[in-house]
Image: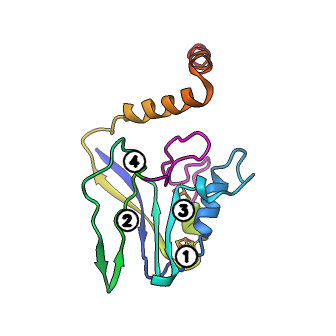
Amino acid sequence: MKKVKKLIKIDVDKCNGCRACEAICSAFHAEPKYSSSNPDRSRIRVVHDPLRDIFVPVYAGEYTDSECNGKNVYTVDGKTYDECDFCRASCPSRKLFRDPDSNLPLKCDMCEDEPPLKEPKCVEWCINDALIYEEVEEEVEEEEPTRPLEIEVGLEALVKQHGVKVVMDTLSRLGKS
Ligand code: SF4
Ligand code: SF4
């Protein structure tokens, strides 16, 4: 079975740290759309260290419930990047890619919309062409299953915020609709 995979390639040398991508991503995903802009809610974040000329845009990937063992420091073209700089995970070791209010993990959805956008908002707003959108067709065996872990984390955060009863009542109401 063929499936179209959507990718954003990143050219760190073209990124100047303007953070327009963070602003538009959070605005596009605000409720209602474009009603606010808060980089803490963005699904793309820019690792930002002007003194070392380091700017790395990273868009949010999967949630993970534990830290990894692969915290490496990389030196590329004479620049040394800190551990986790290239990581896309929403991970318990840092605040990145967590909604500041609900603590729910944030994940890039490639700006799903109806009708579909020509390209994701962060790509459109990056005037330096540091973000390059690509669609690649690839062979897959079957649809990836939804990760129950993400549902668990989401429910846990909602229970912490609203209490078990409100969450249970809401689920029960949704189940009947
Ligand atoms: S909009 Fe482009 S240049 Fe600006 S921070 Fe984001 S990736 Fe970098
Ligand atoms: S593709 Fe859309 S959801 Fe993903 S980081 Fe860019 S603006 Fe945010």
Judge the density around disc 2: few (<14), some (14-19), many (≥20) Cα neighbours within 10 Å.
some
Callout 3 amino acid: Glu
Q: Quick check: is the Cβ at mark 1 less than 8 Å away from ligand 1? A: yes
Q: In this view, does 141 lie above or below 174?
A: below
114 part of magenta stretch: yes
Residue at 62% x, 42% y is: 101
Which segment did they paint magenta? 94-120
Measured Cα–Cα span from mark 3 to mark 4? 21 Å
Cα separation, mark 4 vs mark 2, equals: 14 Å
Q: Which of marks 3 and 4 is nearer the N terminus?
A: 4
Identify the residue at image location x=43%, y=77%. Answer: 12
Q: Name the residue under label 2.
A: 86
Disc 1: which residue: 17
Q: How far apart are marks 1 and 3 (CA)?
A: 21 Å
Which residue was labeled with disc 3?
A: 119
Nearer mark to the viewer, of 1 and 3: 1
- Confirm or deny contact between disc 1 and disc 3 (CB under 8 A): no
Q: Which of marks 1 and 4 is nearer the N terminus?
A: 1
Q: Earlier in the sequence, mark 4 or mark 2?
A: 4
Could you say which disc has been placed on residue 62 in the image? 4
Q: Mark 2: which secondary structure? A: loop
Q: Disc 1 or 3, which lies upstream in sequence?
A: 1
> How many residues crowd around disc 1 within 10 Å: few (fewer than 14), some, or many (20 or more)?
some
Mark 1 secondary-structure assignment = loop
Question: Relative to 117, is 66 on the left or the right?
Answer: left
* Mark 2 vs mark 3, CA separation in Å: 23 Å
Q: Is the Cβ of the residue at disc 1 closer than 8 Å to that at disc 2?
A: no
Closer to viewer: mark 2 or mark 3: 2
The first of marks 2 and 3 along the sequence is 2
